[in-house]
Amino acid sequence: MKILARSATFAIAAAAALAAGQTARAETPSAETVLKNYADIALAGYSDALTKAKALNEATDALIANPSEETLKAARQAWRDSRPSYQQTEAFRFGNPIVDDWEGRVNAWPLDEGLIDYVDQSYGSESDQNSLYTANVIANQSITVNGETVDVSKITPELLQDKLQEAGGIEANVATGYHAIEFLLWGQDLHGTGPGAGERPYTDYAKGDECTGGHCDRRGEYLDAATDLLVSDLQEMVGNWQDDGAARKALLDDPQKGLSAILTGMGSLSYGELAGERMKLGLLLHDPEEEHDCFSDNTHVSHLNDVLGIRNVYTGQYERVDGSMVEGPAIADLVAAKAPKIDEEIRTDLDDSVAKFGAIATAAENGEAYDQQIAEGNDEGNARVQAGIDALITQTRAIERAVAALDLGGVSIEGSDSLDNTEAVFQ
């Protein structure tokens, strides 16, 4: 499996590079140099995500122009290829307001897919929480949002972003980003916790009488608009991390606050977001609808790359898609100078998390998808996922000790009812 092999190679290379880097940096680096390298890694990561999004855009254009089994397969693979780079940037969330304010446009989930397109009868026809539950923009020329008629006859990036994303103030109305595109490429996964992902046929994009699902031309327009928008959104974030970008400037203008942002991002992604909302909730409910990449059964890859991204940020090292390395002074150096045992603990914990998520990914690549691993009655799969959750919780506690060692204020690690108040999950 490419992602696991690449991760193992990275771990070995990173360890060797880190040892060399520590020898070269005998003196404790300044906060400014740590933040510069952190921003350089962010820029490299978002740039790689942009490169892969452009390739996805080209592949979906080819599918729309010439629908076939081959072009659908290529578009799906381009989507899968786009995920690792983006997921490794998620460690820049939570501590950086510019990223937090933007992130929902590209990676929001879960989504009520009936807003976008046709759904299976088992999905139901209405929701007490969402009047747009089955609005089906692709099949209609207009929809009603909070009593107002919205013209959706022309599907454009602007329509998706300005009128449909979180329409009616409802977070589940996800109209843009990776997961909207994922749904358009795979369709619903109707297999529950059994084997199999979404099975949308290429004929959903076909011309004339070969069209299935109805409105194939509008489905192509939606896919085209969504992929174009993903590219432009990532271009915006790349700009934010360039030398004169707002995200980089915000960090360097207040170095102590910038260091707090690093550990806030690491801790919040580890604990509340990944261990809690993306993993423990689905495990408690044994619910495949709580799987992050639920249409494609790609969740194991996304979760593993989240964990790799956290380690990247701590060690100050990132392997780009072209194999080159971005590396330099890191928050790890500051922790090591103040509390070397805590630094060793965090490194050990991060490596253990990568190993635990590697086991989840290996099982998935061997035929037991993530939604099968969280299925009720799958004791071995449940234990494997729980081991990943436990590893994330352990590394979060070590991150909290690093915050104390550096005497940083302003670090607020997000929690999750799934971890902190499990009774609320079942209410």
Image: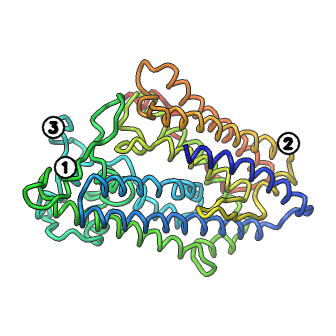
How far is mark 2 from mark 3, CA to CA?
A: 56 Å
What number is the disc on residue 341? 2
Q: Is residue 209 left or right of residue 218?
A: left
Question: Given the image, on which type of amino acid does mark 1 rest?
Answer: Ser
Where is residue 235 drawn, in percent x and y?
Answer: 47, 73
Where is residue 137 drawn, in percent x and y?
Answer: 18, 58
Residue 147 visible in the shown view = no
Residue 68 visible in the shown view = yes
Identify the residue at horizontal 65%, vertical 68% (top origin).
39
Q: Is residue 268 left or right of residue 145?
A: right
Identify the residue at horizontal 15%, vertical 37% (top origin).
121
User: Looking at the rendering, in which quadrant would you find the N terminus?
Assistant: top right
Q: Are marks 2 and 3 in contact (CB under 8 Å)?
A: no
Residue wearing tag 3 = 121
Q: Are marks 1 and 2 in contact (CB under 8 Å)?
A: no
Residue wearing tag 1 = 131
Question: Given the image, on which type of amino acid does mark 3 rest?
Answer: Gln
Q: Please determine whether, in this image, residue 377 is positioned above or below residue 88.
A: above
Q: Quadrant of residue 174?
A: bottom left
User: Looking at the rendering, in which quadrant would you find the C terminus?
Assistant: top left
Q: Please determine whether, in this image, residue 223 is positioned above or below residue 342.
A: below
